[in-house]
Every structure is written in C-alpha cells, then in structure tokens.
Amino acid sequence: MKRGCSKEQMAWRAAQEIRDGMYVNMGIGLPNLIPEYLSGRDVVIHSENGLLGMGPLAAAGTEDPDVVNAAKQAVVISPGGAVSSQADSFVMIRGGHLDMTFLGAFQVSEQGDIANWHVPGSRIPGVGGAMDLVCGTKKVVALMTHTSKEGEIKVVKQCTYPLTGRKCVNLVITDLAVIRVAPEGLVLEEVAPGWTPSEVQAVTEPTLLISPCLREMGGPA
Amino acid sequence: MDKTFDSSLAAIHDIRNGATIMTGGFGLCGIPENLIRALLEKGVRDLTIVSNNIGSSDLKQGGAYGVALLFRNRQVRKFIGSFPGPVARLDWFLDMYEKKEVEVEIMPQGTLNERIRLAVAGLGGVYTPVGAGTLLAEGKEARVIDGKEYLLELPLKADFALVKAHTGDRMGNLVYRRTARNYNAVMAGAAAVTVAEVEHLVEPGAIDPDQVHTPGIFVQRVVKGELYERRV
C-alpha cells in the first residue's frame, strides 16, 4: 500500500505552524516529537502539570523527581522557565493564554469537533487536560494518522466517538494531508508527496474543498 | 503556634473508615508518600480518594505506587479524579472495578482543580466552558453567557487533604519545589483538616514571607516525612 508522511515528517510539518514568541502545549504521543524541530526557535512550551518553559527529557542519571512533564517523564526546565500550581496552569489553558495546542485524535469532524479521550468499550476512561486544552487554546491542531490502523476513516462528517470538544479544531495535520477547518467546510491545503487530492478524498468522509494554493507537504531537510 | 506531629501515623490518627481524602501530587511527582504509607499501616477502609491520578504503575517497581497502593490494598471504594491512568488498566484494578468494589468518577483536569479551589475559597460554584456538549456534561446545569455555553461546577470538599511540601515551618507555612507544587498548592485548605508532610521542617521565621506558597492558615498539621523514595 502507498505510504504517506512519516511521524517525523508530520512532527516537522506541525512545527512549521509555530511562530517565534508563541506559548505552545504539546499533547502526549505524536505531538511529543514536535520539539525536535524547534531548536533555535523562540518558543515557550507549556506542560499542563504546571511547567511553563519545558525543555527536553532529562538525561539518564540526571532525573529530578520534582521536575516532570504531563506524561510523568523527568524533563529539564528551560532557561526562563516558571512553575505554577495546577490551578494556575489551567487558568493559562482555559483563559485563552496559550497560542497553540497539538493533540492526537480518534476523529475530527467537518465542523471541527474532536474526539480524542474515550473509545466506547474501553472500560475505564480518563480525560486529563484534553477538554480544557481544546476549549481554551487560541489555535487547536489535531495531529493524527489519516485513517486508523484498522483502516477506519478519522476525518468524518460527525464524530461517533464521545466528543472532547465542539467546533474547536482549526487545523488537521495527518500523514496524508493538511486540512484547514473553515466556516465553509474542510479545505485541503496540502497533500503528502505522491498523493493526489482525489486519493486523499477517498479516505475522507466529508467533501474536501480544494485550496487555490494547494501544495505538497514539505519535510525536514 | 506549633502544628507538628511526631509521626505520619500520629498526624492521621483520626482518619476513620469512610473518610474522603484528597491527596496531592501528579503521577508520582509530589505525592505525600509518608502519609499514604501511614494510611496503609492504619488500614482504614471504604475511603473516597480525590486525586488527579490513581498513583502510577511501573511493573519494574512492583506494579503500583502512591495512592494505587491503597486501591490494591482494597481500602478505597471510590476514586474522584481526572486521569486514572495506567493503574486503571491493570488486571487487579479492572477486576475490582468489574465487581463494583471500586467506583470511578472523572472530570476534566481543570475542572477538578477549580472545584477543589471553590471549597478552599468558600464559593458555591463556578461556570466553566470545559466539557460543554460532551458526555461529561450530563446531569450538569448549562448556561449560555455571552453566546457561549458553560457548565455549573460545584465545590469538592474532603474530610482530610494530604499534601506534600519541600519545606514547611511549624506553623504550616509551605514551600513546594518545582512541578511538585501541582495539586498540593490547590488542595491545602480544601478539607476540614489539611495535613502537610514536609521534607524539611524549619522554625518559624526561617522561610522568607515573600517565598511562602501556602500560608499556614490552610494547614492544620505538619509532619516531617520519615522516608522519601521520590520515585519518578
């Protein structure tokens, strides 16, 4: 089967959305790869357990149990970093102070609804900060594979999995495409190298509008 | 004023079966590990635990740590939190859950800490946009403010709040370290009795007043933790 972009290419593409001076939150999983592509950039990374200015993972043997990220991994605090309580950390999120968040997703709908916390049938769900992040952040980017491992379509007309938030996703970056959520519908902005818009449409439920500036997704040099 | 107790066990001597207990920490970062150990030793049962996670699991380190130990020891009947986490996927936990020996109530992380803060602040509720239109909105009063839908969230109180600080004085003034501040700074004061375990116990005056994170009025008891594993 024809392949799309690698995880690394997707993370690189996601990093291109980030402008210098931004405060950004990365979810657990694929979004965790984004900081790899931010070296030399003037960006502050927020970790919802109460760390603004998160640096890389701590090197083996230097872990400080009092310095962890939202995935409970030992990390390093960047110069200029600041610690806050849980309450203040979520004030930053809910209050619209974060510029951008990147989240994995099970489904994203035509209206920008996102489902990423609970697969029906999983026995004990956990929500964490996902609902807060999609609700409060200025720009929400879903970073996910275009279809599931089982081949299920993930860009859908209506989410069938329980929602994390309504009308909150601004951009979808997948291994096959970059899709902008616009008032008139989903706009196909970029396609993976070697993929045509009709091939992307074939694995996307809602009808995609083709951007007049349609281009190929780039990748790390 | 001296709020210190001689041991963690003495500091929780009056926690009874059926109590609702908040425990600070995020994963294993900043958990009141000595007070949790004392609860295990005391053996109180039918507890309701309010915590972000159910401790954490690391199969290399015996499968569970933090409040997860209280669940594994069958001392808890209800978890109220945000992200039960990997412990909730372990066989022994799922078994208890299927047999309805333990109940799980979850809410968005920011909602959890605002509800706790309401209790500390003496407020009756807060409207949050988080969770509107989702499964977690079921049964909650919704209200449109300025064209946006909000949910009414009510205070979350406890009988005891167990928190951990890096440094504390005998009057209960606390200083947290790095991301171990997390829920500790939120839960102090949300219960009838807040017990703070500290790594370093100092005399009043030793902490610069400008550097106090939790003023002593929110803390009823202070104990110097006996043993810190400080697992990651």
Image (cartoon, helix red, strand yellow):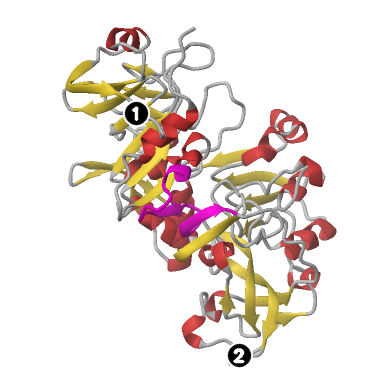
Q: What residue do we see at 31% from left, 16% from top? A: A157
Farthest bottom residue in view: B205
Front residue of this view, candidates B56 and A193 = A193
Q: Is residue B38 left or right of residue A169?
A: right
When asked about the image quadrant of residue A171, the answer is top left
* Quarter of the image that includes the C terminus of chain B: bottom right
Using the image, tell me which numbered label, if any, was put on residue B150: none
Which residue is identified by label 2?
Answer: B206
Judging from the image, mark 2 belongs to the subunit labelled: B
* Mark 1 element type: loop
Q: In the rendered structure, which amino acid carries the disc numbered 2? A: Ala
Q: Is residue B97 magenta?
A: no
Q: Would you place residue A166 above or below residue A139 in this image? A: above
Q: Inspect the image, locate mark 1, and give the three-letter code of the amino acid beneath it.
A: Gly
Q: Position of residue A93 (x, y in %)?
A: 37, 51
Q: Which residues are magenta?
A: A35-57
Which residue is nearer to you in this view: B100 or A206?
Answer: A206
Quadrant of the image containing the N terminus of chain B: bottom right
